[in-house]
Image (cartoon, grey):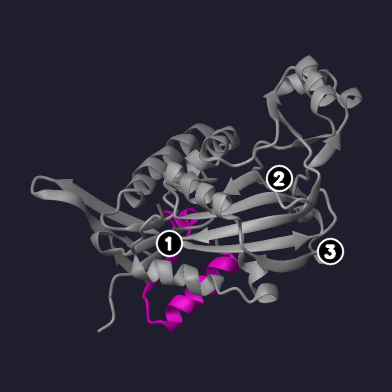
Amino acid sequence: MSDPRPVLVVTNLDDPTADLVIAELHDRDVPVVRFDSGDFPATLSCTASIGGDVTQWRGSVRTPTRVARLGAVRSLYYRRPSGFAFPHLDRQDERFTAAQARYGLGGVLASLPDCLYVNHPHRIGDAEYKPAGLAAAAACGFAVPPTLITNRPDDARTFINRHGPVIFKPISVPLYLVDGKAQTVPVAAVGADEIDDSIAGTMRLFQAQVDKAADARVTVMGNRIFAVRIDSNLLDWRTDYSTHTYTPVAPPPDVERAIFAYLRHFGLVFGAFDFALSHRGEWTFIECNPSGQWAWMEPPTGLPMTVALADLLERGTHDHRT
């Protein structure tokens, strides 16, 4: 008899990666309840109770076609929900109402008993702070390029003169639309003569440029590692995917150990790591995205990534590597 406990998939409507995973789960007869937090309250509702003799949240989440009992969710795949929005309210009321939804519905979904989170939304939030990620990477044993975060122009110039060539990169990349299309903010080389007083307006991140031969994206799903070398001859490989050549590779043992130490540090089950590979074969940590993309690498490499993630969600348990 199949397990009736559902997998919750929390993401926006346009998410081809989630579509692949859901299709795989459907093929296995694993029940799935998919919704976007942006559906609340129009087509998404929730009731939860606790207290007295009840020591764990009881109740349900309901969509137009599915109902998930809160105490019977085997795993929750937290991808890229659009967030709570109440545009019919004035700004103050919208802010208040969104806070009730975030800490109410969001808090219940973050407190499900016996549920495997891939990843837990609070752990995602922790790991998305780039300064915290770089500090954890250094502590876990990764090679980390010299990095400066500052809003002081003189300090930026001094860093560039000492460590050049240097690149400038965003610390965080919220949704940025141009003519209705989401934009990628590229990594760019920067010289000391380009630094002016506008630097003082907010925090900026500068990093010594790695003399790289290629890049690597390492995607971890539970205890499984999928590492792909990306040859592009680009400073930022995200700017032109048509130039890429993909080759499955195996990370060095010390890098693999550091990867799992990093995931344990943040309490993550999934991570998409980016590395710069030197001509001497050294792996330098660039960043780890706790909600990173991976599906585009599956067809050219043949790596069974969708199957691996579906395995994890279906099983609903995970043992960290030591």
| Range of magenta residues | 13-42
Q: Position of residue 149 (x, y in %)?
A: 68, 26
Q: Helix, strand or loop at disc 2?
A: loop
Label 3, secondary structure: give it: helix
Please tell me which residue lies in front, 129 or 266: 266
Q: State the mark number for residue 43.
A: 1
Front tag of 1 and 2: 2
Residue closest to the eye, 173 or 310: 310
Q: Is residue 159 left or right of residue 50?
A: right
At 71% across and 37% down in the image, what residue appears? 170
Query: In 3D space, how far apart are the residues under numbered discs 3 and 1 (Cα atoms)?
Result: 42 Å
Q: Which badge, 3 or 1, comes first in the chain's sequence? A: 1
Q: Residue at x 48, y 35 (%)?
A: 95
Q: Nearer the viewer, residue 278 or 135?
A: 278
248 relative to 82, above or below: below
Q: Position of residue 283 (x, y in %)?
A: 67, 49
In percent of width and height, residue 249 lies at: 65, 65
Q: Amino acid at mark 2?
A: Tyr
The image shows a total of numbered marks equal to 3
What amino acid type is highlighted by mark number 1?
Thr
* In the depicted structure, whether residue 201 falls above or below residue 128: above
Q: Name the N-terminal-most of marks 1 and 2.
A: 1
- Determine contact: label 2, label 3, CB under 8 Å: no
* Contact flag, marks 1 and 2 (Cβ < 8 Å): no
Left or right relative to 294: residue 115? left
Q: Earlier in the sequence, mark 2 or mark 3?
A: 2
State the residue position of label 3: 243
Disc 2 and disc 3: Cα gap in Å? 24 Å
Q: What residue did someone put label 2 on?
A: 176
Q: Is residue 212 magenta?
A: no
Structural crowding at the residue carrying mark 3, measured as other residues with C-alpha within 10 Å and reported as few (<14), some (14–19) or many (≥20): few
